[in-house]
Amino acid sequence: MGKRKLGRVLSFFACAVGALLAFAAPASAQKLVTIDGSSGYVDPSNQNLAGPVHPGMGPHPGKLMINVLLPDGYTPKKRYPLLLLYHGSGERFDSWADPLLGDIRKTARGLNAVIVMPEGAQGFYTDWWNDGRRSDPAWEDYVREFVLPTVQRRFSIRPERRYHAVAGFSMGGYGTWLTAAQLPGFFGTAVPLSAFASIRTAESLVAFQTASGGVPYETVYGPSTGFYAAGHDPTALGPNLAHTNLDVYTGDGQPDPAVRPQNDPLHPGYATDGDAISLLLESFLKLQNDSAVQEARDAGNRSVDYTVHKGSHDWEFWRPDLRSAIARGLFRPTPEAPSSWRYETAATEGQAWDVHFEFDPAPTAVATFERSGRRLEASGNGTVTIHDGNGCRFTADLPFSRVLPARPCRGLKVRVSGKLRRGKAKKVKVTVKGPNAAGVAQPVDAARVKIAGRSVLTDFAGRATVKIRPKRRGKLTLKVVKKGYRTAARKLAVRR
């Protein structure tokens, strides 16, 4: 056989083998799902929703949307970690997924987690002060009361704090600091990237007018010297983050043309792409993150990783920073429920670890809750209603000091379906409900159902299915156990 003919044969064979391998190899099963995020907490008509960030993007749909990236091989039969991923000012819910921006499929490749990317407009993920109304919009409530429950209801999310992380850049980095500080009992790891880490510094007050799309500072935070601004400043919320894994990244404002050529003052894009301003902004944000990191360390946090590198305020740095955080471990161990903690807030309602609080009327000063074992103390002013981790409720004026009950004050309502017969494999379906942290009856997630030596956990809808084969007639006891609730038991008859 001549060399030319042999070459054609080998080329054909190689192409055929390649085609077979491509057919046999499983394609990436990552799936991007876009869901409607509309809610009463935020009216999109009064928010600055970004248009196309680059010419290839389509127009904004004009309403709140949430992008969710499901991992390879996602199945509702398993539970997955959660990464809540915020965008920055001037970006939108689909920026992280865009191949020219966040390129999240590639950036988070191999991360076996559900990645949730909500719309944040230019709202700074804050319940706006609005002359004391603290709403319209209420971005904090939107995340806590709508986004997270919606995702947990629609997708299969692990319940443990360790497996919940929040990350974001710029304004989204500020949202990362703030959300982690407000929900320390839910998020185990926070990854601020080039974050606004203070909203009260002189440069922040100047930059805010641009970052907010022209919304006046006092509309969002009230006076910069006031309690509401202080209660939303990460550099003052270190105690809230004392038990959280912090993985903080920022540039120092020094050019890094190797990563982004426009950082070079001689590059044609240095002026047209705004890199001079971007580098200056990053140098200011670095100082803010220095302060926020030190505040967390001073509060006793020994799980802070702080990475400072060259570079500007651009995607070329945020993508590798997030990859580094993923490689370090977004879901590494962290205390699930420390017995002692300190929590500071200017919110009207919220969740301090396992303690739900609600002020009426709204507070007029930063409130501090401090727990040591069963003792809960509070300082500040106003009247607050507390629901503790055992579902026990009381209303008190601040300041106060209380010993919380050791025994749960709430029970579980259990519904069971499925007839049992001796020697026959049958499915027992269980639905569990009970008061949540705010005292509202709802399905109970991660309650443990035990029967005939089998043990399963309920899902977010409070449902569980147990398959058993009774060996004898009589009664089987089904027990449902959940920390903070009284144990519930049901006797199930086994017939012939």
Image: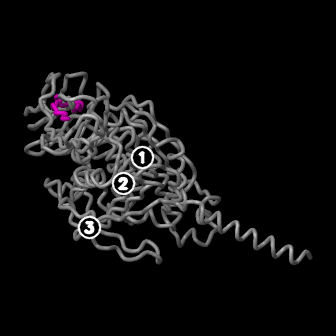
Residue 383's spot in the image, x, y percent?
8, 37
Q: Is residue 413 above or below residue 402?
A: below
Earlier residue among tags 1 and 2: 2
Q: Whole-Å distance between the Cαs marked 3 and 1?
A: 26 Å
- Find disc 3 in the rendering and name its residue: 47
Identify the residue at image location x=35%, y=37%: 241
Earlier residue among tags 3 and 2: 3
How many marks the image carries: the answer is 3
Amino acid under label 3? Gln
Amino acid under label 2? Ser
Q: Is residue 478 visible from the viewing direction of this image?
A: yes
Please state if 322 lies on the left or on the right of 451 as rendered.
right
- Find disc 1 in the rendering and name its residue: 288
Q: Nearer the viewer, residue 94 or 222?
A: 94
Q: Quadrant of the C terminus?
A: top left
Q: Whole-Å distance between the Cαs marked 3 and 2?
A: 20 Å
